[in-house]
Image: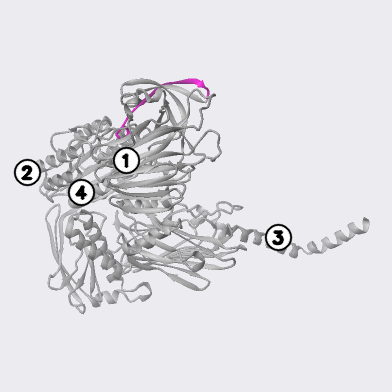
Amino acid sequence: MENNLLLCILLLIPTFASSDVLVTHIRNIKKRNAENDLVVNGIEIYSMKIDSKVTSRFAHNVITSRAVNRGNVSKEVFFDVELPKTAFITNFSMTIDGVTYPGTIKEKEAAKKQYEKAVSRGQTAGLVKASGRKTEKFTVSVNVKAASKVTFELTYEELLKRRFGKYEMFIKVKPKQLVKDFEIAVNIFEPQGITELEAEGTFITNELQNTIKKTFSEKKGHISFKPTLDQQRTCASCSESALDGDFTVRYDVKRTTPDNLQIVNGYFVHFFAPTNLPNLPKNVIFVMDTSGSMYGRPMEQTREALLKILDDIKEDDFFNFILFNSGVSTWKETLIKATPENLDEARKFVRNIDASGMTNLHGGLMRGIDILNAAHDGNLVPKRSASIIIMLTDGQPNEGVSDIHTIETDVKSAIKGRYPLYNLGFGSGVDYGFLERMALENKGLARRIYPDSDAALQLQGFYDEVSNPMLTDVELNYPENEIQDLTTNSFKHFYDGSEIVVAGRFVDSNQNQLTVDVRGEGAKDALSYTTQQDAEQTAQAFQEQEYIFGEYIERLWAYLTIEQLLERRIAATGEEKENLTAEALALSLKYKFVTPLTSMVVTKPEENDNEDVIADKPTEGTDMFTFLLQLRSQVFFPSAGSQMYRGSQPTWYTSVDGDPHFVIWVPQKRDAICFNINENPGTVLNLINDPVTGITVNGELIGDKRANNDAKIQNSYFGKLGIASKHLGLKLTVTPEKITVQNGNEKMGFTWLDSVTLQQAGLNLIINRKKNLVLSMGSGASFVVVLHQVWKKHPLHQDFLGLYTLEEDKLSQQTHGLLGQFFHPIDFTILEIHPGSDPKKPDATMVVKNNELIVTRGWQKDYRRDPTHGVDIPCWFVHDNGAGLIDGVHTDYIVSSLF
């Protein structure tokens, strides 16, 4: 034993005999640990670079990510980035073991079949989808063999906008793991010269601040951000990355004259941003939605924003408030000058604004327009002033004139192009397409206000953008016989800190000189001058060729033209819309931009079953079929921490599932009400009935296989659903065994073992094999039916169905039924919370519909994410079959059959 022990000691001693060897040994251990930190799920992203080149406000960005599979088996590698919503993707490729798989731009319709085929096979299609206020997410994955490498490269371009006196470039940084070689490099070239340059990141700590390198002189600017591995860590011993947030670059240019003209190879761009002009007095009408859905936090935030706006209104300005709910009320009968006394009175008025009732949007807007028109006609406001209407709403018109086409027509006829209309849509319940169309038809724009903690700042921020008008009726005129394909060149207002950009193409591509006539109305007098530029001056300014990418002015012109064609297309109809679509599509294909009219297709290698990856440009108003496809593959079973469970309301806020449990989400309360219906098997209940759209949904109850003698109330579930559209002549019968579609005398049948994508005669149907189906009929609401399967030999239970509603605001105000009646705003108050029979479930008094009900705090199951176990959703439970909550009694909703 002594010899053996001595042998061990002798073997160990040489290992640590030298302090240098010991240090080396420790370093090797640290190195191995550091290398292990770089590998997540067997994948190491060893390089990620974001290279941005900006030339005359036009940004060309390339994101390159390199990864290696460190595992012993094939692994799936993800490329997941977020880009600005204003950007167009122009290229994407994957290189695997030296073989490149490039993307090709196709017309969306041409790529649609490939997309549907990929989705119907359940494959993970690479999609671009909205992921935040400013960004869209591009995600693609590919299987990579052990020890193999893959390189992803994505290119996108955008024209940087000037806001509050600076151009802003936004880069989302989120590698999700430590990256050995991470770098952001931004190179800016501005022929006018750069006056200021700054960079900041929401994730930048004091230690990381020193890694941002910034230099600029004359026409060139450079930003570099290249953190080491240790600087990327959230803490010294952590393997998580601290790089998670927004990286923003801002700069501005020298302005010795109001504008700058650049001419290159038959194209020109004209930047117009005068300085040192006095601001015009402004006349502002605030048209505010005070309906019941604005109750609570939204109204608090609106009041907060209005009070701050009143602090910023200048004494030369005129203003008024119009409030609409079921009716319309005004603060004053005419526009009022912003004297200190009037502002104090306005603050008192704003503090007392409350929310209740329906949404008479038409009445509110028309009253505001009438007041503004009367002020101009009666010379109550200065002749040299700028008038604007700002409308805020969180819902859709459901009182007075509710037809959106009639509202659009009436508003446009009343405004007559005299001043812009700005529509702010608060939350997700608005018809944003309607708000955007109406704003664009009246020389304004629409903006989403996200119902987050900073909603008041969002509202105030928008006002700040339009609060300092410097010119009205701006026109930039070019010789008609020399220029073709001109972008928009007349603008109702020019605001301080912004910039007007016009681009065009010369009739003669060899022409190298241009004269521009500029006109506008200022606070004191008219602005009128002529400016001239030739190509030689531009060429002299652009001697540093390493900063130039391709035909940048031509691409800038194409980008701006496509953007404006798509914008005009929103409000167009008929032949005009077809022509605008054709023109925008042709330019998108020619210049290889992924726009709402095109898709990028990348075919993966054979080991990935030649799966097609489709990159689409999302829009605010996605067509229903594409939306349902994305819903099926991306949204239906989100994690509990996803957007569905955050914010002001979940994606679905009425449902019936289980035994049967009805769950009603009340957005203004950020809370839910629930109730059960106890009836015998075979009973058919009317769930939704809309006489306007002709859509009905009925459900037939089933019971357990045999009675449970231990239970006071026997279990019942929905075993059959009948969904019909009277106007389309469609009937859909859903059971746990099959789905039958009937269109007149024609019938089609499917089982839950099928994966189906069907678009026919107004019906959009997607069956997600053995899980759920998603459907819409016409332009009405969409529904999701969840399949619950139990063990076939279960002694009691049998398979059943759950129903969840989606976009129920597309149904009319006359919708009723056990679920349908709750598609309208409902309010309640909880009083006297006290212990109940179950210590974990307190009782309370609920005041709802003028009834006082005893309710119990409890939970119901949400089976969207997990059809087997479900997720607990807290709610106030109304007893006795919903008595006092539902209209009438529950037996009123019993019908004779499914249809």
> Between disc 4 and disc 3, whose residue precedes?
3
Q: Residue 438: which disc?
A: 4
The answer to whether any part of residue 551 appears in the image is yes
* Disc 2/disc 4 C-alpha distance (Å): 24 Å
The amino acid beneath tag 2 is Asp
Q: Identity of the amino acid at label 3? A: Ile
State the SS at label 1: helix
Q: In this picture, is 731 found above or below 554?
A: above
From the image, tell me which residue sits under label 3: 26
Q: Quadrant of the N terminus?
A: bottom right
What amino acid is labelled 1 in the image?
A: Glu
First reached walking from the N terminus: tag 1 or tag 3: 3
Label 4 secondary element: helix
* Image quadrant in which you'd find residue 516: bottom left
Q: Residues within 10 Å of mark 3 (few under 14, many from 20)?
A: few
In the picture of the structure, the residue carrying the numbered disc 2 is: 377
The reply to whether the C-beta atoms of the residues labelled 3 and 2 are less than 8 Å apart is: no
